[in-house]
Amino acid sequence: MIDPLKSPPQISPGMVELSRSADGAWQLVFTGDWRAGGAHPLDAVIAQMDAAKTLGAVTLIVDDQTLWDTSLLLAIRKLEAAVALRGGTTAHEDLPNGLRRLMKLAAHTEAPTGARRVTVAPTVLARIGERAQSIWRETEDFLAFIGEAALAFQRLLRGKAGFRRSDFLLILQDSGAKALPIVTLISVLVGMILAFVGAVQLRQFGVEIYVANLVGIAMLREMGALMTAIIMAGRTGAAFAAELGSMQANEEIDALSTLGFNPVDFLVLPRILALVLMMPLLALYADILGILGGALIGTTLMGLDFSQYWAQTLRALNMTHLCIGLVKASAFGIIVALAGCQRGLFAGRSAAAVGMATTSAVVLAIVLIVVADGIFAVVLDILKL
């Protein structure tokens, strides 16, 4: 029993000594108090290592009376590095079992990465190559997604693709009736701008009446479908990407797959069908408002009679112009839906990833719309339409 009146025994501070045994082997002997807070000088023993010509195998020994914690582990790691630097090796067989387990655990722990990692900035060519590879991978993913959507549409025709009718009607309303205000504003302004720009040029020849031809043909063949598609890419395409991206982040899409639902059939197909149905109607609505916006400029700034302007518009237009615009609108609707859904389904599982997917969906849709419009122009020129 320890007498409380007696002072506790004094323990010497932690010491380490490099010595040679009777058979000539080197030893590092640790004694004293090797706990945190104490002074543990290692310079002296490192100087002894420098004095020794060759170290060879060095045995680590901890005295039975030594008090230690992780401070001893850190000291051993430093001395091991010093021994290795001088061409020697260390043996741990004579260490306490607990210390050997700690050393084994420390040896299998990877060094932290991040702030201390030294990175070399890639060259311009390396960045160009990485970006090219990224674009190629994204193109492959998008083409694969188009194939999956085509197979889903095939399953729909055979009656094997299922989605909820209520979801389809809700998407139809969001991408149709709720888009009318912004489509109205943009279409009227586009028609007024076309009429004003055309009037400036046609006034020089005294044929202001042909502003009706310019506005009517431009709206039906080109601007009605194009401007509606860009509006829907920024409005509905972004909404599709945000909705599906949020579902991906919340693992709802994984849950649908686990329950046996095909995400493309259940989520993507109704969105594509909704835009394919609504885009021609919205484009036709935009055509009418654009023509009325042009008529407003023609009757107010150019002094034309409205009945004369309307009659000239009807003479300039035909069903070919109308059908071309509606076909373009349907194709643009497919592009907007595919871009929004693909970016949403392939989004990461974080809020930042959902935002990036939304932005990427809008950019991708607008780029593909412009490319598709250029292809339409070339094909229609070849067909003489």
Image: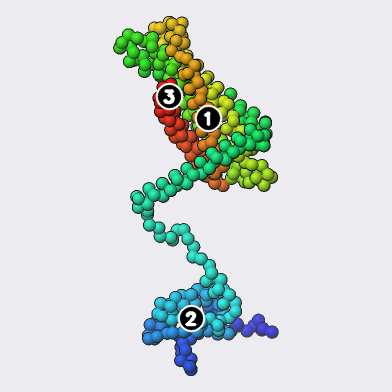
The image position of residue 274, as x and y in percent, is: 59, 29
Per the image, the residue denoted by label 3 is: 383
For marks 3 and 2 on the same chain, the one whose residue lies earlier in the sequence: 2
Given residues 146 and 200, the one toward you in this image is 146
Whole-percent x, y for residue 255 in the image:
66, 45
Residue plotted at (39% across, 7% down)? 303
Write down the residue under mark 1.
333
Q: Amino acid at mark 1?
A: Gly
Q: Position of residue 76 (x, y in %)?
A: 49, 77
Badge 3 local density, few (<14 within 10 Å), some, or many (20+)?
few
Which amino acid lies under the numbered mark 3 shown in the image of this protein?
A: Leu
- Distance between mark 3 and mark 1 Cα atoms: 23 Å
Can residue 17 be seen here? The reply is no
**Res 368 visible:** yes
Q: Residues within 10 Å of mark 2 (few under 14, many from 20)?
A: many
Q: Amino acid at mark 2?
A: Thr
Which one is in front in this view, the residue at disc 3 or the one at disc 1? Answer: 3
Label 1, secondary structure: give it. Answer: helix
Residue in view at x 64 percent, y 42 percent:
262
- Quadrant of the image occupied by residue 264: top right
Residue 157 falls left or right of residue 284? right
Q: Is residue 132 above or below residue 267?
A: below
Name the side, left or right, on which 173 lies relative to 87. Answer: right
Query: How far apart, in angstroms, are the residues tagged by discs 2 and 1?
Result: 71 Å
Element class at badge 2: strand
On the image, the x and y values in percent for residue 118 come to 40, 60
* Residue under the image location 66 percent in, 84 percent down: 3
Would you name the residue on which mark 2 appears? 90
Which of disc 1 and disc 3 is earlier in sequence? 1
Looking at the image, residue 10 lies above or below residue 341: below
Residue 377, compared with residue 199, is above or below; it is: below
